[in-house]
């Protein structure tokens, strides 16, 4: 068998795999759900977004989010045997939807339209220090996500700046105290890594806006909305993107109830009132 024939057979075998790894422009491994369709879709979205006019980075986040409407909701889309940067445009959960919209916006903000640049920005947002280094390097908690990305000037929390604000003090340790819910934590090194990450969030103080005050808050189109929770050990139970309809703020999110990415029909304040565990919201904006 000649060399070119061997290459063609190897390529055919690779295309049969649903998820496999490739190298990004920075030589980082990436697991695509479907490489051909994912990279094509990302490129097309970026080309479309590059033609749009926008007044702020968060408005661009909203535009990007709307390009993802209708994608099916599936929980735990990042879980696997090993921690690899995962790109999946066929299935999202609330966090991966938000991160992909933000990464698309960040890519356009940097005047790029390549899927490789999107992959780079997604890693920057999703992982501690912007680099995959095992399961504990993923920013699992939104408080950790905010702190790490704020430190690297990717985002800015504006909760205390835009409306009547209260403060919560909470120890964030849901993962380690519910180890059985996370298959990856069967590995002792991963469990230790998560425990170490949680150390910085003992008696963690953070701002939030209560549901009764959401109408008064100066929320803007494309703000990232993190819903705070009364669940023990957990800071945030759900995330989405603000979109304004007829002067009212609605949540664009990957809905477990609707089983897809939607703009919720309920105004955000009403959505929060119907969620028994929701204590309020935190608001984050993408930085220029």
Image (tube, grey):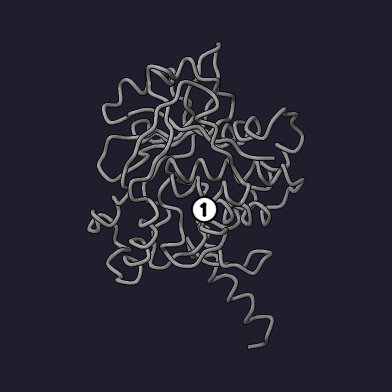
Q: Is residue 26 above or below residue 6?
A: above
- Depth check, front residue: 192 or 241: 192
Judged left or right of residue 198, residue 87 is right
Image coordinates of residue 17 in percent, x first then y, are 48, 65
Quarter of the figure that contains the N terminus: bottom right
- Depth check, front residue: 45 or 96: 96
Q: Residues within 10 Å of mark 1 (few under 14, many from 20)?
A: many
- Depth check, front residue: 27 or 217: 217
Judged left or right of residue 125, residue 79 is left
Residue drawn at point x = 45 percent, y = 53 percent: 139
**What residue would you read off at disc 1?**
126
> Which quarter of the picture shows residue 274?
top left
> Which quarter of the picture shows residue 197?
bottom left
Judged left or right of residue 169, residue 1 is right
Quarter of the figure that contains the C terminus: top right
Q: Is residue 90 above or below residue 159?
A: below
Image coordinates of residue 153 in percent, x first then y, are 63, 47
> Which quarter of the picture shows residue 276?
top left
SS for tag 1? helix
Judged left or right of residue 61, residue 77 is left
Residue drawn at point x = 42 percent, y = 30 percent: 208
Residue drawn at point x = 23 percent, y = 54 percent: 178
Residue drawn at point x = 34 percent, y = 71 percent: 189
Quick one: which residue is furthest to the top in this view?
A: 246
Quick one: which residue is furthest to the bottom in this view?
A: 1
Q: Is residue 269 above or below residue 135?
A: above
Image coordinates of residue 96 in percent, x first then y, are 48, 46
Image coordinates of residue 26 in percent, x first then y, are 67, 66
- Depth check, front residue: 45 or 197: 197
Could you tell me how many numbered marks the image carries? Answer: 1
């Amino acid at each position: 068998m000649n060399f070119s024939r061997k290459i063609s057979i190897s390529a055919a075998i690779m295309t049969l795999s649903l998820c496999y790894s490739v190298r990004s422009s920075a030589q980082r491994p990436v697991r695509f759900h479907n490489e051909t369709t994912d990279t094509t879709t990302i490129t097309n979205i970026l080309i479309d977004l590059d033609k749009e006019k926008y007044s702020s980075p968060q408005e661009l986040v909203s535009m990007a989010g709307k390009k993802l409407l209708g994608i099916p909701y599936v929980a735990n889309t990042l879980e696997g045997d090993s921690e690899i940067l995962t790109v999946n445009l066929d299935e999202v959960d609330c966090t991966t939807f938000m991160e992909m919209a933000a990464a698309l916006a960040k890519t356009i903000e940097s005047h790029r339209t390549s899927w490789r640049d999107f992959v780079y920005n997604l890693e920057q947002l999703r992982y501690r220090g912007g680099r995959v280094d095992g399961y504990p390097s993923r920013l699992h908690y939104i408080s950790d996500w905010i702190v790490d990305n704020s430190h690297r000037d990717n985002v800015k929390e504006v909760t205390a700046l835009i409306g009547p604000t209260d403060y919560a003090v909470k120890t964030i340790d849901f993962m380690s105290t519910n180890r059985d819910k996370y298959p990856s934590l069967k590995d002792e090194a991963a469990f230790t890594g998560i425990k170490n990450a949680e150390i910085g969030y003992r008696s963690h103080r953070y701002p939030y806006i209560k549901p009764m005050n959401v109408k008064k808050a100066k929320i803007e189109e494309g703000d990232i909305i993190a819903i705070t929770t009364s669940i023990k050990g957990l800071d945030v139970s759900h995330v989405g993107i603000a979109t304004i309809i007829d002067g009212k703020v609605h949540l664009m999110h990957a809905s477990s109830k609707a089983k897809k990415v939607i703009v919720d029909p309920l105004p955000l304040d009403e959505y929060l009132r119907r969620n028994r565990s929701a204590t309020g919201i935190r608001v984050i904006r993408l930085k220029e």
